[in-house]
Image (cartoon, rainbow, N blue to C red):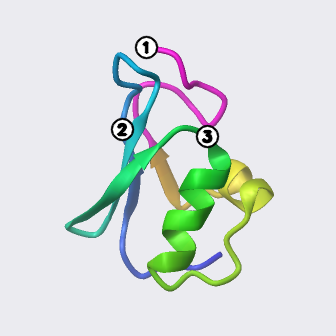
Amino acid sequence: MTSAQPVVVYPPAADGGRRVRVGGQFLGMAYGLLDVADFLRLAGMEDADEASVEASELIEWRGGGPGVWEP
């Protein structure tokens, strides 16, 4: 998975959703790794899948890593 723009996944909200941003654009709320991968594919990262999202060093996870979905 490659991206010229920074990818940020924000801390979990009260409902467990995490905002996903690529560059300056918020793509939506993710409720799991599959959602993050879907957003990244829509942003042009065709090879994004759950495993690559979990292992990627290109994603900045704020408020916990890829396994944290509870507030």
Amino acid, disc 2: Tyr
| x and y percentages locating residue 22 in the rendered image | 35, 66
Quickly name the residue at label 3: 32
Mark 1 residue element: loop
Query: Which residue is depicted at the point 79% across and 55% down?
Result: 51
Q: Is residue 41 above or below residue 32?
A: below
Amino acid, disc 3: Gly
For residue 49, what is the image quadrant? bottom right
Q: Is residue 21 above or below residue 24?
A: above
Which residue of the protein is positioned furthest toward the left in this rendering? 24
Q: Which residues are magenta?
A: 61-71
Labels 1, 2: front one: 1
Q: Neighbour class for label 2 at 10 Å: few (<14), some, many (≥20)?
A: some
* Distance of label 1 from label 3 (alpha carbons): 13 Å
Magenta segment includes 54: no
Labels 2, 3: front one: 3
Query: Which residue is depicted at the point 55% across and 55% down?
Result: 36
Query: Which residue is depicted at the point 55% across and 25% down?
Result: 69
Query: Which residue is depicted at the point 41% across and 82% down?
Result: 4
Which residue of the protein is positioned furthest toward the front in this rendering? 15
Mark 1 vs 3, N-terminal side: 3
Mark 1 vs 2, N-terminal side: 2
| x and y percentages locating residue 9 in the rendered image | 42, 45
Mark 2 residue element: loop
Quickly name the residue at label 2: 10
* Distance of label 2 from label 3 (alpha carbons): 12 Å
Amino acid, disc 1: Pro
Mark 3 residue element: loop
Quickly name the residue at label 1: 71
